[in-house]
Image (tube, rainbow, N blue to C red):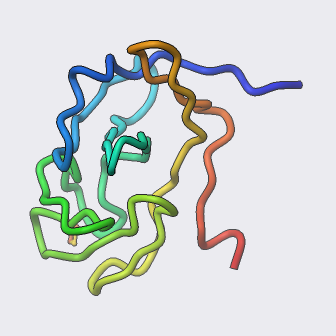
Amino acid sequence: AAPAYTFIARTSEVEPDYALQVQVEGRPPLAVVCLEGEYFVMDDTCTHGDASMAEGEIVGCEIECPFHAGRFDIRTGAATVYPCTKALTVYPVKVEGDQVFAALDAGHCADDAA
Ligand code: FES
């Protein structure tokens, strides 16, 4: 069956190079990022500690944790800079008009593929 897509945000709410935290009822918060016109949705909580990645900084195609400056690749969720060693789960994204959707039942963790 095709995955069900959940509304995440309007494109106008997602500023370039600035992650937006999104709450979807019944699950941990998500972060949505726009990189060069492409949208990415991932878990917002750092895999190293209880930090909101949306409060961190975007550096190139990576997002830096506001707590200990670990980083993840926004496109794959893979941990790239210590002390982050476990990937963030990322979700397939679909943009329709000015709305961003993500398939929250089809999350992908880069560690599982390795
Ligand atoms: Fe994110 Fe430590 S909580 S790097």
Q: How many marks?
A: 0
Quadrant of the image containing the N terminus? top right
User: Is 103 above or below relative to 106?
Assistant: above
Quadrant of the image containing the C terminus? bottom right
Q: In the shown orientation, is residue 87 left or right of residue 13? A: right
Across and down, in percent, residue 9 comes to: 34, 20
Q: In the shown orientation, is residue 83 left or right of residue 102? A: left
| Camera-side residue of 113 and 37 | 37
| Camera-side residue of 18 and 107 | 18
Q: Residue at x 31, y 51 (%)?
A: 45
Q: Residue at x 52, y 16 (%)?
A: 96
Q: Residue at x 68, y 69 (%)?
A: 112
User: Is 45 above or below relative to 79?
Assistant: above
Q: Residue at x 20, y 42 (%)?
A: 16
Quarter of the image where one finds residue 23: top left
Across and down, in percent, residue 12 comes to: 23, 20
User: Is 54 above or below relative to 96?
Assistant: below
Q: Residue furthest bottom?
A: 82
| Camera-side residue of 63 and 35 | 35
